[in-house]
Image: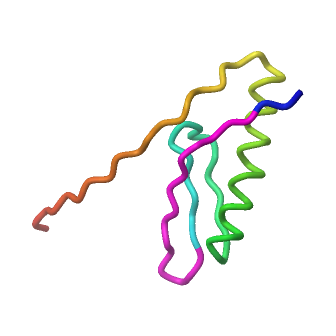
Amino acid sequence: MAQDFSFSVVLEPQEDGGFTVLVPALPEVVTEGDTEEEAIANAEEAIRAVLAYRRDRGLAIPSDAQPEIRLVTVAA
């Protein structure tokens, strides 16, 4: 029976449109989409693939990592 997993994702808007998606708990997941919906769907597909890869090789499936975002201001 399939097990449900939930992972936090980071949607990063791109200058030319669309989004890049990162999954902090699964650093091997980096994907993108032209819309937020497409980006999330692509992330779900990539997460499934990574979980299957890890399961097939006996690798641990990590717990969700709750990202914390901070603003850093520097003079350059």
Residue 73 in the image, given as x and y percentages of width and height: 15, 63
Q: Nearer the viewer, residue 47 or 1?
A: 1
Give the residue at the far top of this rendering: 58
Residue 35 in the image, given as x and y percentages of width and height: 65, 76
Membership of 54 in magenta stretch: no
The residue drawn where x is 56% and y is 82% is 17
Residue 50 in the image, given as x and y percentages of width and height: 73, 37
Give the residue at the far right of this rendering: 1
Q: Nearer the viewer, residue 66 or 27?
A: 66
* Part of the protein shown in magenta: 4-18
Q: Is residue 57 left or right of residue 67?
A: right
The residue drawn where x is 81% and y is 32% is 52
Residue 26 placement: quadrant: top right
Q: Is residue 18 left or right of residue 43?
A: left
Image quadrant in which the N terminus is located: top right
Membership of 6 in magenta stretch: yes
Above or below: residue 49 compared with residue 53: below
Q: Nearer the viewer, residue 47 or 4?
A: 4
